[in-house]
Amino acid sequence: MGFCTYTEKTDNVIEVLRVVGAFGIKGQLRAILFSDNICAYKKVYASDGCEFDFRVVRFVGGKHAIISLSGINDRTKALSFKGSALYVKRGDLEQAQKNEYYVCDLIGEKVKIIDHEDISCKVVNVFNFGAGDLIEISYKDGTFLVPFKKENFPSNEHEEGIFMTFSAFTCYKD
């Protein structure tokens, strides 16, 4: 169900990768990827608005890759990007289909408990440790994690929003 994982929400851009270091002497960068379709993007943007032509040189396991950015051609320049987030414009993303979400759009959304309108919950964060997405839900003074699966979060074809089953709520909140 997740598409861009662990992303930061802003009005016009979405974080798709974070630089964790330099690779080699020719300006390549090591990065953590927050998008399942990172190769679809040809341009990325730094937080200051600078635009870079972008390509994945190779994947190095899981959500890590070696990337190159236009104009970054030595190790010193590459090291200056360590810790930097890189973004794509929201308009460059594919339109999410019904019952599909960009993770960054889930954060902060109210969660409606099916048949229990009096329960107030909200999405705090989304995690993926390798076995699927976990939604962190706030309830009263605490939070709890719920696997982001169809049986816990069924679609509601008549209403917009995020719906969680009461059985998932009672099972995971304690």
Image (cartoon, rainbow, N blue to C red):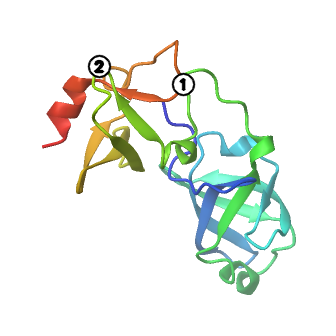
**Closer-to-camera residue (80/7):** 7
Neighbours of disc 2 within 10 Å: few (<14), some (14-19), many (20+): few
Q: In the rendering, at what x and y percent does residue 142 appear?
A: 23, 55
User: Which part of the image, by quadrant, shows the C terminus?
Assistant: top left
Which residue is located at x 16 percent, y 32 percent? 170
Identify the residue at horizontal 29%, vertical 23% (top origin). 165
Give amino acid for label 2: Asp
Q: Is residue 98 left or right of residue 124?
A: right
46 vs 106: above or below: below
Which residue ends up furthest to the left in the rendered image? Answer: 174
Could you say which is closer to the camera, residue 138 or residue 147? 138
Label drawn at residue 160: 1
As helix, strand or loop, the secondary structure at mark 1 comes to loop
Residue, disc 2: 115
The residue sitting at 65% across, 29% down in the picture is 96
* Circle 2: element type: loop
Task: Decide which of 92, 116 is in the foreground and name it.
Answer: 116
Give the Cα distance between marks 1 and 2: 15 Å
Q: Which mark is residue 16?
A: none
Q: Amino acid at mark 1?
A: Glu
Residue 119 in percent (x, y) is at: 28, 35
In the visual, does 83 lie left or right of 138? right
